[in-house]
Image: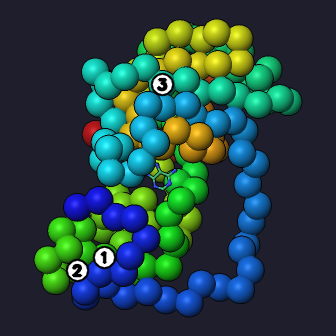
Amino acid sequence: MVRENEIRRSEIAVALPATPDAGLYFIGRIRTPWQSRLVCPRQGRADGPICRIEVFEPWAAALDGIGAYGRLEVLYWLHLSRRDLVRQSPANDGASRGTFSLRTPVRPNPIGTSIATLVDVEGATVLVRGLDCLDETPLLDLKPDRTLFVPVAPPQPGDFQVGDA
Ligand code: SAM
């Protein structure tokens, strides 16, 4: 059941700490077809619409090499979410669960992650499929999908080696 900002029966809100422990840079914005949480998908799909990830300066140079990966991990800031619920009732049926057992956007640090399929890179804009965020959602980070990424530096002690159980 899609949430706006209400607190439902059996949900628990807490007082947020007075100050945050770290700062973030919004490195871009994500353009999607969805203007409302009522129509936004709950999880992205590989056959979803093409979305545009617009990377701001001075970060565009950091896109170099990204076109080599067919899938990207996209991290974004679910900026319209409340952040104070520790128990939530996704079905709004009186039953609740802990926030960290859910992929809800309502969390103390409202970070969303998706594995997206890379469609193209046009200058400072990355085109992908597989997102589930509202239009104008702030971008936090882009990384190669970990299953595709081979470390550039030689193996280090403690790295998992091929053939390890
Ligand atoms: N795939 C991400 C994850 O698992 O971390 C996000 C999943 S979350 C369930 C996706 C939902 O968050 C959408 O259906 C929408 O209701 C909500 N949402 C999307 N963009 C948002 C934003 N910018 N602020 C607040 N809520 C947002």
Pointer 1 with pointer 2, Cβ within 8 A? yes
- Mark 2 and mark 3 lie on one chain; the one further toward the N terminus is 3
Q: Nearer the viewer, residue 146 or 45?
A: 45
Give the labeled residue for mark 1.
88
Q: Is residue 107 among what the camera can see?
A: no
Q: Horizontal placement of 75 versus 93: left or right?
A: right
Q: Residue drawn 18% across and 68% down?
A: 91
Pointer 3 with pointer 1, Cβ within 8 A? no
Rendered location of residue 141, percent (x, y): 62, 39
Disc marking residue 96? 2
Q: Residue drawn 60% across and 11% down?
A: 121
The correct choice, above or below, for 20 with respect to 69 in the image is: below
Give the labeled residue for mark 3.
51
- Mark 1 and mark 2 lie on one chain; the one further toward the N terminus is 1
Whether disc 1's CB lies below 8 Å from ligand 1 is answered no
Q: Amino acid at mark 2?
A: Ser
CA distance separating discs 2 and 3: 33 Å
